[in-house]
Amino acid sequence: MSFVMKGRTKSNAEAVNEYLKSIHEAEAAENRKKDMIDLYPDQELMNSHFFDSISKQNQLREDATRFMSFKDEVHKELMFHFLENVVFDPIQEQSMMNSHQREVLANAIVDYINENDIYGILDTMESGNIYLNEIASYITEAADNIIANAEEKKKEGLSDEDAYTIENDKINDFINNAKGVIPDSYIDKIMDRVKDATDDFIDENRKNKSAIKNIYDAAKEKVEMADGDPELQQEAVRMAKIQENKLFSAPTNVFGQMMRIVTESVHLIKPMTESYTNHTTNKIDFNKLQGDVEVLYTFMEALNTLGLVEANEQYIKDTLDNMRDSIENIDIVDTLDPAGEKKVPKEKDQNPNDDDDNNPSNDFITISNSLG
């Protein structure tokens, strides 16, 4: 395996400035030649030259902007295919992701690339482990080749639309070169960490379900012993709910926190409720919900394991906050009843597998309705 350490990639602003500077210098030299030929141009000619110069500068800026936009697009496209086809292709196969989950993963990759500076990601790769460094060199090499071909097409007179294209064979060549660079041990480590997180969540969920049952069994006995006294019955239910809330406010792992955020949102936000409703049973499809959260958690764990991000406490907090904020930004007007109060579904009624110990929804189920 060979790899080349690259220098820092220029930012868009630096590249545009250098591009424009070279054009301006060439234009200035040409103007000096013209001035030596005609030392006394008339005013009309000077005005014409001035406006022509302004027009040329504007055109150059437009050309530079289009060029830099294409340059960004090329690097982003290559980064996407590195993540999807090199890193996550074997993970998708091992996890037996369905088409919906693959779409969720692809969207997560696109969001990551768009929300971060593509050249900053490349800098991280170039200064990271030898595998990321080698992939970064492949991305840079492939991008340079694609961009050079586009510039040649422009010189031949092709339009921007025809010249600034990314050919499939160039992408396929990159994928073939990049495959095999990341060792299988990294993929195995990612899969193991995801399995550990989901197993811990399922085990915690099973214990929570058992604890809730005990809480409400005890409360039901107190209700029966109250001999019809409404105050004692209400107090028994109130205390049971307090214990239940304490149980669910207890610390959980990152996967569990992600499940809480998404599950609570599915119960409150109409578009998410519709998305996760099994329209045959008219109940929330919690298997689909957990599957989507597993995909998102796998993506985050992969970035951490590869060294693209440092999943420290602050990063995890920021990720969960961003996840919560993005969900809260969904239009929730339709989740309000005419009185302006949130319509919260009865969680027990929404549960399709009440006796399934592995059902993630049990982390949010109350059984207080059974107390009458």
Image (spheres, rainbow, N blue to C red):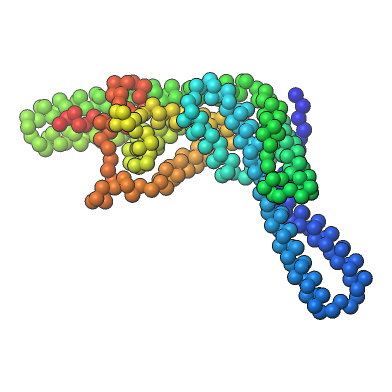
* Residue 267 spot, x, y in % from top left: 33, 38
| Quarter of the figure with residue 253 | top left
* Residue 322 spot, x, y in % from top left: 47, 43
Q: Looking at the picture, does residue 338 appear above or below residue 245?
A: below
For the C terminus, the quadrant is: top left
Q: Nearer the viewer, residue 41 or 85?
A: 41
Q: Residue farthest to the right?
A: 37
Residue shown at the point (58%, 23%) measured from the top left: 90
| Quarter of the figure with residue 44 | bottom right
Residue shown at the point (86%, 66%) measured from the top left: 31
* Residue 81 spot, x, y in % from top left: 62, 33
Residue shown at the point (59%, 41%) measured from the top left: 113
Q: Nearer the viewer, residue 222 or 108?
A: 108
**Residue 124 visible (yes or no):** no
- Tell me: 109 left or right of 255: right
Q: Nearer the viewer, residue 80 or 279?
A: 279
Q: Looking at the picture, does residue 57 appear above or below residue 129?
A: below
Q: Residue farthest to the bottom?
A: 43
Residue shown at the point (61%, 36%) measured from the top left: 80
* Residue 203 spot, x, y in % from top left: 39, 22
**Residue 123 visible (yes or no):** yes
For the N terminus, the quadrant is: top right
Exactly how many numbered labels are in the figure?
0
